[in-house]
Amino acid sequence: MIFLGILISVAAIGFFCWLLFMLAVFALPLFAGISAGVWAYHSGAGWLGAIVVGVVAGGLTLGVGQFLLLMVRPMWAKLAIAVVFVAPATIAGYHAVHGIVKHTMPSETWQIVFSIIGAIAVGITAFFRVAGVATADHSSRDLARN
């Protein structure tokens, strides 16, 4: 029975790590959506209005970011846009890993070390996911020019 509990725990940790890496790119749109939703709620929009405003703001943030990555030509501008999306993902990765390791090790120094390593891993993963959007195959657009 203990062996089954260990296997389920390892599977759950693996699932949540996979989820963290997959959703890291969406940290900025999520933050924008939550901020807009809270603002809408406090300005009297109610729960439903706050949810609608939050979803629209998050979707617009993601859509504008992807549009800019596809349309902007200079590499420095694409890098700046990628950094805007990667920085919140890195911060979210730090806090997610810190939340996990503070329950597993008593040393505060090692908690910070592992949190920084996790933040770097999440940041690199988010950068490659954002860069994948920027370097998407545009062969159909190139064929239209010929």
Image (tube, grey):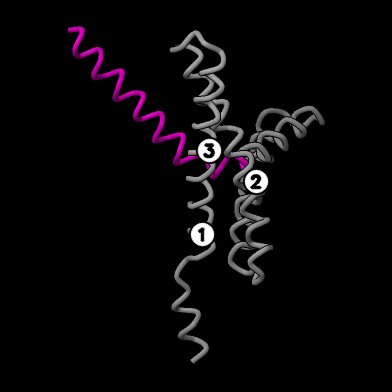
Q: Which residue is mark 2?
A: 56
What amino acid type should be assigned to the residue bearing mark 1? Val
Q: Which residue is mark 3?
A: 120
Decide which of tag 2 and tag 1 comes sooner along the chain.
Answer: 2
Q: Any mark on residue 133, and which?
A: 1
Residue 8, position as x, y percentages in the image: 26, 19
Horizontal placement of 101 versus 67: left or right?
left
Of residues 140 and 82, which is closer to you in this image?
82
Of residues 136 and 47, which is closer to you in this image?
136
Decide which of tag 2 and tag 3 comes sooner along the chain.
Answer: 2
Q: Residue at x 35, y 30 (%)?
A: 15
Residue 5, position as x, y percentages in the image: 25, 12
Q: Are marks 1 and 3 in contact (CB under 8 Å)?
A: no
The label nearer to you, 2 versus 1, is 1
- Residue 58 falls inside the magenta stretch: no
Quadrant containing the N terminus is top left
Part of the protein shown in magenta: 1-29
Q: Residue at x 47, y 66 (%)?
A: 136
C-alpha gap between disc 1 and disc 3:
20 Å
Q: Residue at x 66, y 55 (%)?
A: 81
What amino acid type should be assigned to the residue bearing mark 3? Ile
Of residues 38 and 25, which is closer to you in this image?
25
Of residues 49 and 15, which is closer to you in this image?
15
What amino acid type should be assigned to the residue bearing mark 2? Val
